[in-house]
Image (tube, rainbow, N blue to C red):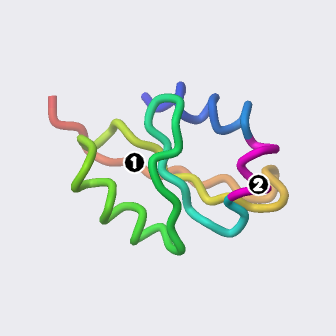
Amino acid sequence: MLEREYAWYKAHYPELVTEYLGKFIVIVEDEVKGAFGSVQDAYNDSITKFPLGTFLIQEIVDDPGKLLKRFYSRVHV
């Protein structure tokens, strides 16, 4: 789950880092849906707009190998 969003993030990293460095972005399918100053703000906004398990929150850092965090949420099926 969310492999599509993570693959999109990796493929578009060069453009994302120039626009969103230091931000937490929300990715749904193949689109950035928001940029926030904290992971908590990104999460709080996203849960009001998207079903759990359908969005990826990714911190944009200057070295993509420097940071890898995984966040999991329960999915209602």
| Majority secondary structure in the magenta region | helix
Where does residue 2 sit, x and y in percent of width and height? 47, 32
Is residue 3 placed above or below 52 in the rendered structure?
Answer: above
Above or below — where is 3 with respect to 31? above
Residue position marked by numbered label 2 in the rendering: 17
Per the rendered image, the range of residues in magenta is 13-19
User: Please, what is the three-letter code of the amino acid marked with disc 1?
Assistant: Tyr
**Membership of 17 in magenta stretch:** yes
Kindly indicate the quadrant of the structure image that contains residue 69: bottom right
Drawn side of residue 72 relative to residue 62, left or right: left
Amino acid type of the residue that numbered disc 2 sits on in the rendered structure: Val
Q: Residue at x 33, y 54 (%)?
A: 46
Mark 1 or mark 2: whose residue is earlier in sequence: 2
User: The C terminus is located in which quarter?
Assistant: top left
Instruction: Name the secondary structure under disc 1.
Output: loop
> How many neighbours does mark 1 have within 10 angstroms: few (below 14), some (14-19), or many (20 or more)?
few
